Amino acid sequence: QPVIGVLALQGDVREHLVSLAECDVIARPVRRPEELAEVDGIVLPGGESTTMSRLLETFELLEPLRKRLADGLPAYGSCAGMILLAGTVVDGRPDQQQLAAVDMVVRRNAFGRQVDSFECELPVAGVDGGPVHAVFIRAPWVESVGEGVEVLARVPDIPANGAAAGRIVAVRQGSVLATAFHPELTGDERVHRLFVETVRAA
Ligand code: GLN
């Protein structure tokens, strides 16, 4: 069984551990470089990307994580995790650190006041069995992606989604996956399974 770590500095760590436990993998929290060294894949949870970025430095995990990602460690980031994985962030803090594992520009807190938090039924490429119930909480969206990045989902174009319709909210680059929404909050493990398949294939 692959060992999948969840970066456990801040955010909804427990929810990701629970989702992964349903996917026939060994799921472990990661707080120390020695723990990072032992995983076959890593999940970056939802939470607050600026806080997580600061804690990555405090816990001396930033450089080891960058190095493992550069060496091809599969990763999945939800929401704040998506922000951390991006090469560039719009509306981030000046001192916010980027892992730059996905060639994309992400806008932090993109949905604005009207749709600060919202939910919708979202078809995701690679996820079979119908749309995912996607929960967005002060979520980012992806402004643009580089050539090697596959777009897996865009906010459906229905009036309720307002200005967000058409925005990119799930991507993949090689073995790195990122979603602006939180599948770990819905009891639907299909996105985690997609990540686990990627880890197994790597
Ligand atoms: N707004 C948060 C951030 O900037 C992300 C919110 C979330 O992860 N639900 O990190």
Image (tube, rainbow, N blue to C red):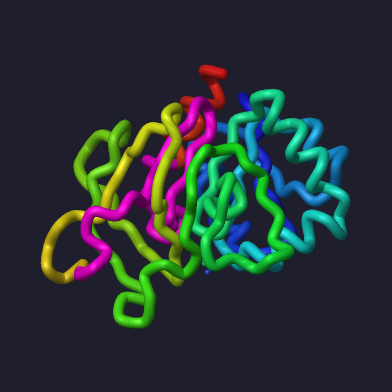
Task: Kindly identify the residue that appears in the image at 12 percent across and 62 percent down.
Answer: 158
Give residue 124's quadrant in the image: top left
Residue at 30% x, 36% y: name it. Answer: 127
Instruction: Note whether 111 is above or below 147 in the view shown.
Output: below
x%, y% of residue 189? Answer: 41, 44
Q: Is residue 168 magenta?
A: yes
Percent position of residue 133, x then y: 28, 56
What's the magenta region? Answer: 162-191
Residue 159 drawn above or below residue 72: below
Does residue 125 show up magenta in the picture? no
x then y, percent, for residue 98? 66, 50
Q: Residue at x 54, y 67 (%)?
A: 91
Furthest residue to the bottom? Answer: 113
Residue at image point 29% right, 35% down: 125
Q: Does 183 appear above or below 42?
A: below
Q: Quadrant of residue 40?
A: top right
